[in-house]
Image (cartoon, rainbow, N blue to C red):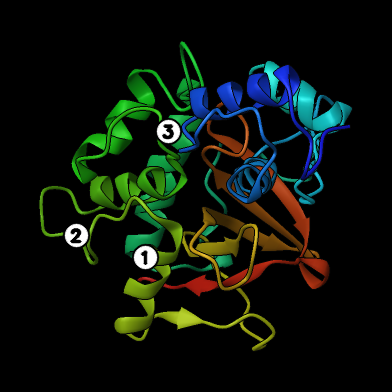
Amino acid sequence: MLSKGAQGADVARLQDLLVSRGYALAANGRFDTPTVNAVRAFQAQNLDQHGQPLVVDGKVGELTWWSLTHPKPVISTPSAVDYAHMPPEAAGGSAHGRAALQAGIGELVAGAGEIGGDNRGPWVKKYLDPAYVTEGNSWCASFVSWCFLQASAGAAMPFAYCPGARALLRECKDKGWARAPQSGYAPLPGDIVVWWRVQAKAWQGHVGLVHQLKDGMLYTIEGNRSSRVQGFSYVFSRMDRLLGFGHVP
């Protein structure tokens, strides 16, 4: 277990691994505050070898160490919906949102994801390029933005192409499209769902597309939670770290 105050070769290797994953850090061999913050940011975005979210505590035990030294695991979980198909029209959703969801499903079916390293490869580059962001950066928000770019079919996008999850939610808030957690809002197919990472008032976030809300479960399509575009499910009443939803009309 490595934690704040530790020093030595193991800490230096930890810092090198974090830098290689895109976290700005000085490899000085001291587990200082910037290292704690980088570890927490990594933990908030990655999974262990069992496909479970890492505990965000700023300490490096076996699970975090495994995640740092292995590619992101591809998770296969049972689901009551088929992520590869659009939800029925009766499930609702705006025309623009459903078109974005259709684009996301197309990427899922095509096996889109990272190739050649963390946050790298031609798929990731395709999502990041319109935001003028280089490979190696988180791509969840750029994936969602790319889906809405495709949904616009050559016309202007309904919001600015955002490489950041919180910036995307701000776009929705500025346009009156945001819905707060615990507001009683039932998200619809093609809606945007945004979570905070590390701290509720920090800058990090994560975002995905709503596939559908069904029988108390929220089904989503997300990029950059595992190494590929993938479907995930949540007990809607127990979802935590939610910042809100965006419904693009």
- For this view, does 65 lie left or right of residue 30? right
Answer above or below: position of 173 versus 121.
Answer: below
Q: CA distance from mark 2 to mark 3?
A: 19 Å
What residue do we see at 62% from left, 71% from top?
A: 200
Say what amino acid the circle numbered 2 marks: Met
Whether label 2 touches label 3, CB < 8 Å: no
Q: Name the disc covering residue 157, or none.
A: 2
Secondary-structure class at tag 3: helix
Across and down, in percent, residue 120 comes to 41, 22
Asked which quadrant contains residue 146, the reply is top left
**Disc number lying in front (2 or 3):** 2
**Disc number lying in front (3 or 1):** 1
Q: Residue lying at the far top in this picture: please name it.
A: 116
**Disc number lying in front (1 or 2):** 1
Say what amino acid the circle numbered 3 marks: Gly
Q: Name the disc covering residue 167, or none.
A: 1
What residue do we see at 54% from left, 28% from top?
A: 27
Across and down, in percent, residue 25 comes to 50, 37
Q: Name the disc covering residue 106, or none.
A: 3
